[in-house]
Image (cartoon, rainbow, N blue to C red):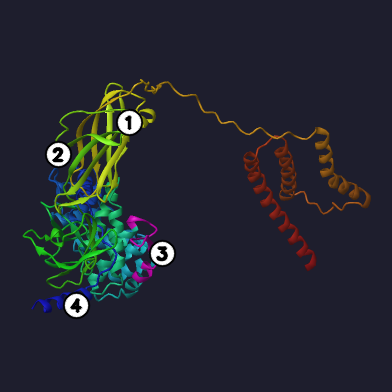
Amino acid sequence: MAATRGISLLLSLCIISCAAVQVDIVPESDLQQLIQKLKGVQPYKDLASAYYSVTGLDSISEKIPEKQDVCGFVKKTMTSNVANLYFGSDIANRLKCKLSPPSDAQQVLNDGIRNGGTTEIINRAVAALINFKLKIDADLVISSLKSALEKDDSILSNAYALNAVAFLPKDVDVSSFVDSISELLNQADEIGDKYLQFDGGLRDTVVFLVGAYRLYGARDITPSIDGDQAIKFANYFISKRHVGSVQDAFYVVLGFAASTINKFQIPGSIVLTSQPLVRKSDSNVVVKACNILGKPLPKMDIKATSIVSTEGNSIASDIELSQKSNGEYHFDFNKLNPERGFYTVHFGAIPVVQDSRLLGLKDSSVKIKKVADIAIESFKIKTSDKEQASVQKEMKTNFPKELPSAVQADEHSNVVIEFVVKDLEKNVEVLPQQAFLRMSCCKSNLERSFLFTSRNDQLLSLELDIAELGKTALYFQSCDYSMDVIIGDPTFSNQIYWKVGTLSLKFNKAGTVPSVKLSSSPKPEIKHVFRTPEKRPPALLSRAFTVLVMLPLIIMFVMWNVFGANVSNFSLTLPNIFFHLGLGAIFLLYYCYWTHLNMFTTLKYLAIIGGITFVSGSSALRAIANERLKTELR
């Protein structure tokens, strides 16, 4: 029987269409913030804000606050234009208000379809006709949508068209719109193998997914949206949950609703409901299967398919979880006899009643930490004479008691502290990640810390050469030093801060603790000093170079005078004049750059002069070409 059930579970896991992409879950606190954002616009001042609030709250099955007579507000403020008729009819439809359409509603909405110009207006008009149970001219809707898409073929425009045709009767041919969904999907951008969105952002993505699912559902067509894409869309909506306006909150929750209420694809995940810390007294790992809003999914068969440590070692696999009464599932982690550390638990789940809509349940994972209570044992502190190298005195104590008396030492002594740390759950000695001794003297306000090192496997020890310590750390301060042993490790459930006792040190000479001066006055202003410019060459050399640069220009004018320059074809038109003036201005600007302008100022002027020169030069060359063409034709 068990073998048969195992085979059935394996086959069901293979049949379920779900993706390897991890499904995110909306934190409860963030969901409540979105709900409060939608509720916060009451009392409503206009139909648009009322629509965003009511429709957003209703889409996630949240109760509408009764601070205001919303139905009465809709009747009072709804006027005969497409937007108001759409907002009012949708609110009335959701709140079951007794709202009759205005006498001219049919005409206004048909005109909106015929002359609206955009697919958004057409979609609103069609939706309002449906809400008011008025007649729809399907041929007019199709032709108007196609005409609007010829003018605007953007993602958002196509998305509104999908929403509009989903309202039409099943005998109307909308195959071209259904086929367009796959083409639109190809334009979606994938971010980090986790999110999927369109360039237009949240609104475009939400309207598209709502329209696609609505159209597929109305026509009973299997979606071209695959499991990975559905999960990535849902993850994208969750990533946008922090919003600033009620309109943005509306689109976010509409995206949540699209990913949780449809006929085809519902992303879900296995999430941890217990504490991520596993102790001896609380070793149950409790999880639940839920959708992206944290709402529980139908009854599941859940297995921990593998449990892997941070080192990559698998400690268990195929552990069946038991169901609790409140829809949660659990197993006892301590029965696996795990070592302290961090673990990733991978889960696989299938519904007891087959549901092919569920995605993301094949490989969900959670992180947990196994911790243990620890204690200090075999603590002793030994003092010895450096010359005799023999133990003069040894004192012991048991954690958490203090030493019975102060430890006496001077600069001829060595002090050695030793102890072990024990895991109380497994009754074994362990090495902590951090262990150090803190010594502090209240008289001189002096404090120093020293690390323990491991000796002989798990034994922690610290040797203090008092003479060297006085020279390098304690400034020969004779004092009764308070000793604290501090032990920390992320896998310890109790971090130890133990006041051990007093170490009384005496030095033959007294030192001075250097004082630290703390100034509250402002520090001097930091002024940047540029590099000293290099020395310029002599003025005579610069002038000689300038003459050499200008020499070709002078030679050109001389040659023109000798051989005669043909300037008879020069036309005194504005393009010719501006072009030559522009060339001269560029040369003048080049000279100014060398004398006193910087590069940024020069580029600013060059952009203006160069633009004028380019436009006028193009016009002048075009005029010359036209004149030459006329001459050739003659």
3 or 1: tag closer to the N-terminus: 3
Q: Which mark is residue 398?
A: 2
Number of on-image labels:
4
Q: CA distance from mark 2 to mark 3?
A: 80 Å
Camera-near label (2 vs 3) is: 2
Q: Quadrant of residue 25?
A: bottom left
Q: Identify the residue at image location x=12%, y=78%.
A: 3
Q: 63 or 286: nearer the eye? A: 286
Q: 366 or 124: nearer the eye? A: 366
Q: Position of residue 8 (x, y in %)?
A: 15, 77
The residue singled out by tag 3 in the image is 153
- Given the current orientation, which residue lies at the most extreme right position? 562
Q: Viewed as shown, does residue 300 lie left or right of 202?
A: left
Q: Identify the residue at image location x=32%, y=32%.
A: 448
Q: Identify the residue at image location x=65%, y=48%.
A: 611
What amino acid does circle 2 point to?
Answer: Asn
Q: Identify the residue at image location x=87%, y=47%.
A: 557
1 or 2: tag closer to the N-terminus: 2
The residue singled out by tag 4 in the image is 11
Q: Which residues are magenta?
A: 181-203
